[in-house]
Amino acid sequence: MLAAVSAITAEAGALALSRWQDDFGRWEKSPGQLVSDVDLEVDALLRDRLMALDPAAGWLSEETADNPDRLACARLWVVDPIDGTRDYLRRRPGWAVSVALVEHGVPVLGVLDVPARGEHWRAAAGTGAFRGDARIRVGGRTDFAGSRVPADNLPKADNMLLMVAKPNSIALRIAMVAADEADLVATLRWGHEWDIAAAVLIAAEAGATVSDAFGQPLAFNTPSAQAFGVLASVPGIHAAAVDKLADRAKALVGVEQR
């Protein structure tokens, strides 16, 4: 199954790459939320191929109207046709096609195709994580200070952290932790399952500790298809990261809107 999903995701990535330099339609589907013709084309390809692979699975995608019937499904395809749309539209390479298969609320297959960077990431539950043919593994940092974080800037309260290059795709930023190119990725907002499902499995199979912003386990195929924040890190700093972010997370969760 992983090989089949990898091939389908790579096909979708090739389609997105073939249109990357084109003059395609783009618009805001809601304030600040960009989408393009290519997002919809890739979404249609993935739905056709993946549902043929497992017709009994439900479907959850950023570019498809949600159907609550998915909640009754034991398995669910969770898809972001182009994660990092801003980078895609700006012709920067930090975007990915993200596909996960969730079973009983837990990701069991995850694939990221990153054709603009020539990368293909994949994982299946219990079998490890890979970029191309190489198995990947998180780093062993235990000191929170000096931890590498993909960011454009950091608040003064986090000046003990070290910024590294940040792709627009949150899935790719989480994958950086899996490949020992970052030590910590954290968000403090309501986010959607399709943004993180594949990357969360890849990170976990590479040895990362992954949770919501409060350090609690993430669940998938929930009614809202959202969670408050994601925190992916090397195991040795996860508790310190949860503690560092706790007050900010508590303050924000009451005002952020689902």
Image: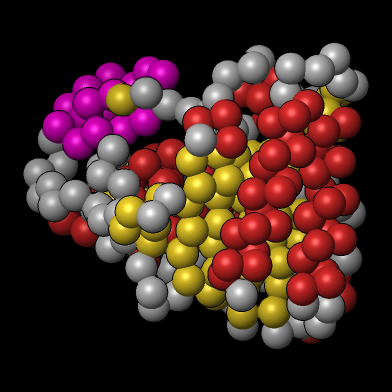
Of residue 194 and residue 88, the one placed in the foreground of this image is 88
- Identify which residue, 140 or 143, lies in the foreground: 140
| Nearer to me, 116 or 157 | 116
Q: Is residue 147 magenta?
A: yes
What residue is at 57 percent from the left and 29 percent from the top? 116
Which residue is painted at 66% across and 15% down in the image? 90
Q: Quadrant of the N terminus?
A: bottom right
From where the camera sits, is residue 9 visible? yes
Please, is residue 232 above or below residue 89 in the view?
below
Position of 130 compared to 83: left or right?
left
Q: Position of residue 245 (x, y in %)?
A: 33, 44
Q: Position of residue 182 (x, y in %)?
A: 29, 38
Q: Is residue 177 left or right of residue 45?
A: left
Magenta span of residues = 146-163
The percent position of residue 181, horizontal first and vertical second, equals 28, 38
Would residue 27 be found to the left or right of residue 163 on screen? right
User: Who's the residue at 36% across and 42% down the image?
Assistant: 176
**Horizontally, is 226 left or right of 184 in the view?**
right
Check the image and report above or below for 191 versus 50.
above
Residue 221 occupies which quadrant of the picture? bottom right
For the point 48% across and 58% down, which residue is it?
Answer: 122
Task: Give coordinates of residue 184: x percent, y percent.
Answer: 30, 43
Which quadrant of the figure has residue 17?
top right
Q: Quadrant of residue 216?
A: bottom left
Q: Is residue 58 rendered magenta in the image?
A: no
